[in-house]
């Protein structure tokens, strides 16, 4: 009956156009971070080499080297980071599994207490805790969500995080390099293109997260080449 009710509720939700985006896949943070990092890192390299009198050939080689090294480094870092975080979470989940196996009554009472803290009446909390505890895997999921704040079945993928970071870094890094690859050997064009890309990236994130575009666009732009802060203006503000 519960399954039928849930399916009916889901169907009604879809009928009314109510749906949510995937927020647990672990791709948005590394993608945004990778793109901004690639953009700022490579535009800094290009500005440094170009400002130092480097030839267009040297600038292109430097930019491509920065792109390859940065993208691989970011991908490796994201993979190791997310994998380590998942391993830590699973270790805590396994600890909770052992508690459920060895101290079932105490864990059931703990679950009832947590439900009461959420505003459920004592009788309903005890009944719900007993019904949930009758299914070990469901009980484990509920305890993990309540105590650890995670769903063991919805952990971010290290492969997705690494791929998103690698691809977005490469995209960000190639933007300030594009004018030189196209034969337009003007440092100002590269810097201007990077600034526009930073603002556009902020707008895209704002659209994705349904935030107001102004503050979101100003955030990445403030880290772009057009707004380096007091140091870029030659002194304190």
Image (tube, rainbow, N blue to C red):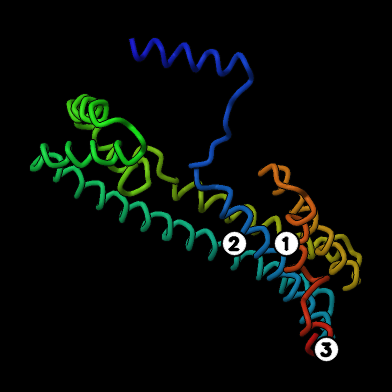
Give the structural element (helix, strand or loop) at label 2: helix
Answer with the quarter of the image where residue 48 lies. bottom right
Q: Earlier in the sequence, mark 2 or mark 3?
A: 2
Q: Earlier in the sequence, mark 2 or mark 1?
A: 2
Asked whether 31 or 8 is in front, the reply is 8
> Which quadrant of the rendered structure holds the N terminus?
top left
Q: Is residue 20 left or right of residue 1?
A: right
Asked whether 30 or 13 is in front, the reply is 13
User: In this figure, which residue is indicated by the disc labeled 2?
Assistant: 71
Q: Residues within 10 Å of mark 1 (few under 14, many from 20)?
A: many
Q: Residues within 10 Å of mark 2 (few under 14, many from 20)?
A: many
Give the structural element (helix, strand or loop) at label 1: helix
User: In this figure, which residue is indicated by the disc labeled 1?
Assistant: 220
Q: Is residue 35 left or right of residue 136?
A: right
Q: Is residue 207 left or right of residue 154?
A: right
Q: Nearer the viewer, mark 2 or mark 1?
A: 1
> Where residue 178 sits: x, y (%)?
81, 60
> Where residue 82 sits: x, y (%)?
42, 55
User: In this figure, which residue is indicated by the disc labeled 3?
Assistant: 234
Answer with the quarter of the image where residue 216 lies. bottom right
Residue depicted at x 61% and y 52% = 31
- Label 2 with label 1: CB-CB less than 8 Å: no
Q: Residues within 10 Å of mark 3 (few under 14, many from 20)?
A: few
Q: Between marks 2 and 3, how big is the CA–CA gap?
A: 31 Å
Residue depicted at x 34% and y 42% = 145
Residue 101, relative to residue 213: is it above or below? above
Residue depicted at x 85% and y 62% = 193
């Amino acid at each position: 009956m519960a399954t039928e009710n849930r399916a009916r509720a889901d169907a009604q939700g879809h009928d009314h156009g109510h749906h949510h985006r995937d927020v647990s896949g672990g791709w948005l943070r590394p993608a945004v971070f990778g793109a901004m990092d690639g953009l700022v890192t490579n535009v800094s390299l290009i500005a440094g080499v170009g400002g130092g009198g480097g030839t267009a050939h040297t600038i292109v080689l430097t930019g491509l080297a920065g792109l390859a090294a940065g993208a691989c480094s970011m991908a490796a870092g994201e993979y190791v980071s997310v994998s380590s975080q998942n391993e830590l979470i699973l270790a805590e989940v396994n600890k909770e599994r052992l508690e459920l196996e060895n101290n079932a009554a105490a864990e059931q009472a703990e679950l009832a207490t947590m439900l009461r803290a959420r505003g459920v009446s004592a009788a309903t909390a005890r009944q719900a805790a007993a019904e949930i505890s009758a299914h070990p895997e469901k009980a484990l999921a509920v305890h993990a969500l309540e105590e650890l704040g995670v769903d063991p079945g919805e952990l971010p993928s290290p492969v997705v995080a690494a791929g998103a970071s690698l691809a977005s870094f490469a995209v960000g890094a190639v933007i300030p390099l594009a004018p030189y690859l196209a034969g337009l050997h003007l440092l100002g064009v590269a810097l201007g293109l990077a600034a526009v890309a930073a603002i556009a990236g902020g707008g895209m994130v704002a659209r994705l997260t349904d935030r107001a575009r102004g503050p979101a666009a100003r955030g990445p732009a403030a880290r772009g080449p057009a707004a380096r802060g007091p140091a870029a203006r030659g002194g304190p503000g």
